[in-house]
Amino acid sequence: MSQNPDLILAAPLWPHGDCSLMHLVRRAGQHSTFCWSQCVDTGLSAVQYAILVVLAEESACDQQTLGQRAGFDKATGTYVIDRMNKSGLLNVVTDVNNRRRKLVSMTAEGEVMLNRMIEQAKSAEKMITTGLNSQDIADLKRLLSKLGGLQEPE
């Protein structure tokens, strides 16, 4: 191992040792993506599912609010919403009171897709939490919410 004291460990020291938080978060992200791909067969991403969930709760909202609620930035949102609009899952219209503002709603086809995905998304969440007890899951949600700058779950 390097003798550089400023070195952040990029990978765990096996069998027991410290490692970089960035490495662990990256690995967790990879595992999350794997679980999603194993359980969800619709071709939609977790972000696209989140958009459908938010629109099921809100019925319609502006693109900025949708991004805040579903957790995506403006550039990602524009691309994803456009794709979902073209595939018939979303309806996007210009706000008559503010032509720079886009209002997004779910179509009937989007609602069908959401209903198809609910159990699959639950399976992905169950898969990613395999081996964790309810307290572990609550702690993980709380810490990830904090890390992501989100409001802590109640």
Image (cartoon, grey):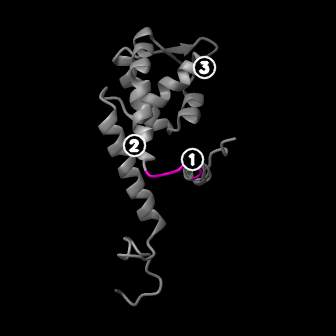
- Magenta span of residues: 131-135
Magenta segment includes 134? yes
- Quick one: label 1 or label 3, which is nearer the N terminus? 3
Secondary structure found at label 2: helix
Point 47% across, 87% down: residue: 5
Which amino acid, by three-letter code, is at mark 1? Ser
Q: Which residue is labeled 2 in the image?
A: 127
Point 44% across, 40% down: residue: 126
Task: In the rendered view, tell whether residue 97 sits above or below residue 79.
Answer: above
* Residue 59 - label: none
Q: Nearer the viewer, residue 130 or 84?
A: 130
Distance of mark 1 from mark 3, alpha carbons?
Answer: 29 Å
Q: Quadrant of residue 78?
A: top left
Magenta segment includes 66? no
Q: Which residue is labeled 3 in the image?
A: 58
Q: Where is residue 75 shown, x and y percent of the image?
A: 45, 37
Left or right of 88 in this view: 149 = right
Distance of mark 2 from mark 3, alpha carbons?
Answer: 28 Å
Q: Which residue is labeled 1 in the image?
A: 134
Distance of mark 2 from mark 1, alpha carbons?
Answer: 14 Å
In this rendering, which labeled residue sits more in front, label 1 or label 3?
1
Point 49% across, 51% down: residue: 132
Q: Residue furthest right?
A: 154
Which amino acid, by three-letter code, is at mark 3? Glu
The crowd level at tag 2 (other Cα within 10 Å; few <14, some 14-19, many 20+) is some
- Quick one: label 2 or label 1, which is nearer the N terminus? 2
Residue 100 visible, this angle? no
Q: Nearer the viewer, residue 29 or 73?
A: 29
- Quick one: label 2 or label 3, which is nearer the N terminus? 3
Q: Where is residue 119 shown, x and y percent of the image?
A: 42, 26
